[in-house]
Amino acid sequence: MVIIEPQGLSALFDALKQKGYQLIGPRVVDQAIIYDEIGSPEDLPVGWTDEQDAGVYRLRKREDARYFGYVVGPQSWKKFLHLPILKLWEAQRDGPSFEIIPNDEPVPKMAFIGVRSCELQAIAIQDRIFLQGDFVDPHYRSRRENIFIVAVNCTEPGGTCFCASMDTGPRAQSGYDLAITELYDAERHVFLVEAGSPAGETLLEQLPHRPATEADIQQAHQLLEQAGKKMGRQLETEGLKDLLYDNLEHPHWQKIAERCLSCANCTMVCPTCFCTTVEDVTDLTGETAMRIRKWDSCFTSDFSYIHGGSIRASTYSRYRQWMTHKLASWHDQFGTSGCVGCGRCITWCPVGIDITEEARFIRENPVT
Amino acid sequence: MAERKKPKLAVWKFASCDGCQLSLLDCEDELLAISEQVEIAYFLEASRATVKGPYDISLVEGSITTPHDAERIHQVRRASRVLITIGACATAGGIQALRNFQDVREFTSLVYASPQYIETLKKSTPIDEHVYVDFELRGCPINKYQLLEVLNAFLNGRKPNIPNYSVCVECKRRGNVCVMVAHGTPCLGPVTQAGCDALCPSYHRGCFGCYGPKENPNPPALSERFTAMGWSDQEIVRAFRNFNAYAEPFRKESEAHEAKS
Amino acid sequence: MKQNHKSQTIRVDYLARVEGEGALYIRIKDGRINDLKFKIFEPPRFFEAFLRGRHFTEAPDITARICGICPVAYQMSSIHAMEKILGIQIDGPLRELRRLLYCGEWIESHVLHVYMLHAPDFLGYQDSIQMARDYPDVVKTGLRLKKIGNEIVRILGGREIHPINVRVGGFYKIPDRKAFQELLEDLKWARDAAIGMVRFTAGLNFPDFENDYEFVALSHPEEYPFNEGRLVSNKGLDIAVEDYDAHFEEIHVEHSNALHSVLKERGAYFVGPLARFNLNFDHLSPLAQEVAREVGLVPEIRNPFKSIIVRSVETLYAIDEAIRIIESFDMPEQPAVDVTVRAGTGHGCTEAPRGILYHRYTIDEAGIIQTAKIVPPTSQNQKTIEDDLYHYVSRHLDLPKEDLTWQCEQAIRNYDPCISCATHFLKLEIERE
Amino acid sequence: MAAVPDPMIPIPYRIQTVQRETDDTFTLTLTAASSEQIAPFQAGQFNMLYIFGVGEVPISISGDPSTPEKLVHTTRAVGTVTQAMQKLKPGNVIGIRGPFGSHWPLEEARGNDVVVIAGGIGLAPLRPVLYTLVKYRERFGKVVLLYGSRTPEDILFRRELEKWRQRFDMEVYITVDRATGNWRGNVGVVTKLIPRAPFDPYSCVAMVCGPEIMMYYSVLSLRDQGVPTESIYISMERNMKCAIGFCGHCQYGPAFICKDGPVFRFDQVEHLFNKREI
Ligand SMILES: Cc1cc2nc3c(=O)[nH]c(=O)nc-3n(C[C@H](O)[C@H](O)[C@H](O)COP(=O)(O)OP(=O)(O)OC[C@H]3O[C@@H](n4cnc5c(N)ncnc54)[C@H](O)[C@@H]3O)c2cc1C
Ligand code: SF4
Ligand code: SF4
Ligand code: SF4
């Protein structure tokens, strides 16, 4: 573990650019801290933070000048790995037949700056879906293979965070190339950096740094300890899967349905939600056809449409599908929870429906 | 494949602003290609030449507001194999359906010096209250790419990719920051059908419902949130009383708040 | 001709290639026009009535829906009226951006009219698609020009029809400078294309037809008018927009049941490109002036058929102006200025592509609209159109009916009437002998 | 980087024959249009069929598993894609991805009686089972086919049914919801045939395919006869966009119908089966 100074970040960014990476990191856009293309540390949200609660997000000025003093943005890294809209392939009519032209547009090498621990876990979950099953999604794979991850440990969890409950944070455990803890107090502003891969190791060598002292490591450790205790939300996961399976007809689903807009925001912002639909597109002459894959959501009616009507016509059934998938059936499907406790679905639900609250209610009032 | 026979296209206007049919002329890059694929048989905004029906595809813009139009739409239906309504006027009665909430005689005398000459129905009604409609394309105005998609789908015998989910889905795919959550700006996106690619939120304003209610909408829950954000009942009434005011879920919502205010 | 000795009725039930729907009814008896009506039967849509009770901030979005062809004009007239009430004056970059938006609408609307609606008349085609078979390049140039106009509106307004980005006080969001810069190249192509457009339209054949009109337009001391100025005419009118109601009125004329907007005690007047051109020639860009002169177009033009050339000159001007604005553009600090509500009455008049568009509103202290009045250009030209037809038809009574019909249509299209705009025309009753 | 095969790219297959089965149902026989072929399939599996420019839908394989080079699909034209498919002619090429999913328990059925219960188009996914039963007849106990159709005109695979009916080692019962013309056979729902069918409930395997409601009542009736739940198999249907577990549409509780199904042993899904809107 080493210490780098804030200027060291510039060196890091330069080194990554040198290696041909496009930098993606946090920046202030439209009154929020989003993940977007960045050029230099000046683009980082220095001195900004976010306040989050159910259905509310506000950008605020910090008292200090931290680089990473915010929590998680409106959308996760999913949008760079599992694209919201992707052309699968194109076909050209050829008499009674047709010829398929695969989409093998080159993918950029991307360096993700500021990935939080919950987000690392979310990426690991999507890896299981797209890379580790019987089939591999080549589009996801080619992007995934070309990223460099600079993680940032969370020292100040947000109002809707509950990674501690999900065992996914606040400290980055694996899946990164470099992990940073921002150490900030009256005396100093430095970064404790740890390499998590040979590539990270090599890069770290090139940066101006000094070895971390035991005190540095202790300070980081303490900050993360405390952070784990300051989570804005909590979710009791013990026996949760069976609890939900046993309560598929709980009257509370109807209560939620009265508030839920079935707008799909929660699924769109969730870093693990992976559902898609495919649209067929043709040109006017009918000579060229394309298949376009787009993020879809279990909250839409077409999602469960089969000839004759939608299986899940009511909001009741759609919310139930979503939540039981996240917290119960995901375990059966992928051997892990589908929720990493990032809190996005709580913050970005326009009416502030809170997955932890709804789970708690069912736990406290089971029908079985 | 056998050479496809050129289908005949007709464009009809009822009470409207012409914006939706103008979308067709706004397809600058595609217009000549369209005219190669279909015979533009009746489209007065663009051509004096008219070809007799029946027509394979009729695009109908506008709502029914006069006794004469209530007759005319039946003729259009009879002459059309496929009838597609375009825009909020045709699919929900349009902005002129605001009269449906008030006494139309009072409206007439407000605007016209000699109200006795004005021949008008009490209500502005959508086309499907009068005749069978094969497909509804929403929007005020419609999105020209969606119009192309619908024409395209009909020409190629497939289902148009016209989703009926919320604006939020497009908003998120587009990577916008939610104006409701992050800025505290009331937004109808969560109850409104997609189609505009989340235009208003992309310009930092709340959606005002051009595309009408999404499938399975929940306006009362959204209104409750608006109230919590500080909106009065009158403001909520006005929010739901725009171009799709007469679409059932929006109508009910505005009436509920009108009763309260 | 034989026909002249008995009575004949010409009815054009649906006027093609105008926006909206109108009809013409002429009754000829013994070689003279017995009756002539230019009829508009757009069903009434009651905008002025249902604006009452709405919040002042909603007027731009609602009034845009009067007309899908020139929504920007509606939005801007209502915004200016509201800003008058609130005592706001928009200057600097925001004002420039508003002009830019206007450029977009003029380009798009004028090009649509010239290439797709009017030129086919002069060349004898039913429509531009037919015309494209013989003049593919002309039509393609037109489409590309139109697209550039639309592109300006789309970037700045969000979409071409019923833009969503304008508000009382400014805009919701200022698009990236990059988006405009990218337009520059297209605009420079467009400038050359518009020069060609002027030359092309100037080369058409024009009927020998002139009238002594009273031209009315906005006039601004420094610029070709879009959004601001005084109302002036070639016959001495020179008033502030606030005084509109004192000088203009809508009257019931004998041979028609339509409400015609007229100048009090003076009668019919003429608004639109020809009026603007005649009254503001000096404020056209040097290039637009030069090209106009080159084709022999200098004030005062009194042949309404030549409006097609004037529209081309104005298109060239709008492109020139758009280039100027983009090249000298500074990002405004805020997308809009703050507004505080206060009660009052305000007037707004802007130059829609078809001519002056007048709005008047009264709002209360909560910002709720109490009364609204809207006078669109088409209703201001209505009487002039009818007068033109009367004179024009009288001279061509010997033409076969089919040709005469077409000629009349062409004469109406000189005004590019936008009938959806006709917010308050009466439905005509047809008199029968 | 080694390129991975893209599981969303179909393999071209050429239509050899189009067989009209009923008014709205047809059978396509396809062979590979290039050197590429899909893997051999097992009875009950399905393919994704892509119609150029129109879309892609899941359709079970209704042909004989022992001749996999001849792909056979029987489809009912109900909507956009299936109607477009109905218009295709021999020589047209369509895209095939597959085979996907679980299959009918023909191994488990060895040595046991086999009850095949089909409703409507549900006979198509079961036809490969019947081919196999007939081909290896000696491996199984009694073989019973119970088939319900809306009307006599909707009966699929008539000639084959007739052939099977004439066999002495197979029982074939057919019923219709509504008798028309000179139908003299059974009228009523297919579940009514179950109590009469000659099979040993304690050593049989039941394979059921049809509308969910029909499957539900079939299961109840089978259980009434004493058939253990673990011996009953059904085939499920859900919206499907990818068939490879990526799109999420076909989830049925914890299962993905595309990979864990479509064929399920009933006890795997029993807890979901009568729940509303799962
Ligand atoms: C595993 C499986 C096997 C099937 N086997 C057969 C078969 O052998 N023969 C047969 O006729 N039908 C079969 N079906 C049903 C068939 O897939 C649908 O009838 C078909 O998808 C309808 O598509 P459409 O575009 O014509 O209909 P539309 O009503 O226009 O449907 C639109 C879209 O919804 C989806 N969809 C609609 N109905 C279904 C459905 N029942 N199942 C899954 N997705 C649906 C499809 O994506 C379809 O493109 C099977 C379905 C599944 C899941
Ligand atoms: S379910 Fe909610 S909290 Fe959990 S990972 Fe998804 S968005 Fe984050
Ligand atoms: S839970 Fe919230 S975000 Fe999710 S669909 Fe319902 S209202 Fe939308
Ligand atoms: S801004 Fe509006 S449309 Fe977009 S996500 Fe938020 S609520 Fe939905």
Image: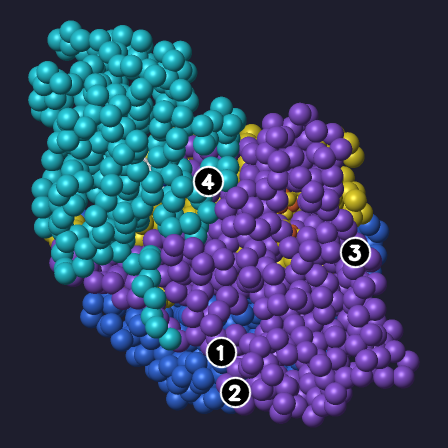
Chain colours: A purple, B yellow, C blue, D cyan
**Residue at 67% across / 88% down in the picture?**
A10
Disc 3 with disc 4 on a shared chain: no
Q: Are marks 2 and 3 in contact (CB under 8 Å)?
A: no
How many marks the image carries: the answer is 4
Q: Position of residue D151 (x, y in %)?
A: 22, 17
For the residues marked 1 and 3, what is the alpha-carbon distance in whole angstroms? 34 Å
From this viewpoint, is residue A183 visible?
yes
Q: Are marks 4 and 1 in contact (CB under 8 Å)?
A: no
Disc 4 with disc 1 on a shared chain: no
Name the image quarter holding residue A302. Answer: top left
Q: Is mark 4 within 8 Å of ligand 1?
A: no
User: Looking at numbered disc 4 in the image, what kind of residue is underneath it?
Assistant: Ala
Q: Position of residue C35 (x, y in %)?
A: 39, 46
Q: What residue would you read off at disc 3?
A: A231
Which chain is home to disc 3? Answer: A
Query: Mark 1 or mark 3: which is in front?
Result: 3
Which chain is home to disc 1? Answer: A
Q: Are marks 3 and 4 in contact (CB under 8 Å)?
A: no
Label 4 secondary element: strand
Is C233 placed above or below A124 here? below
Query: Mark 4 or mark 1: which is in front?
Result: 4
Q: Which corner quadrant holds the N terminus of chain A? A: bottom right
User: Looking at numbered disc 2 in the image, what kind of residue is underneath it?
Assistant: Lys
Q: What residue would you read off at disc 2?
A: A19
For the residues marked 4 and 2, what is the alpha-carbon distance in whole angstroms? 43 Å
Label 1 secondary element: loop
Going from N to C along the chain, the mark reached first, 2 or 3, is 2
Q: What residue would you read off at disc 4?
A: D255
In this picture, residue C269 sits left or right of residue D28:
right
In this picture, residue C167 sits left or right of residue D8:
right
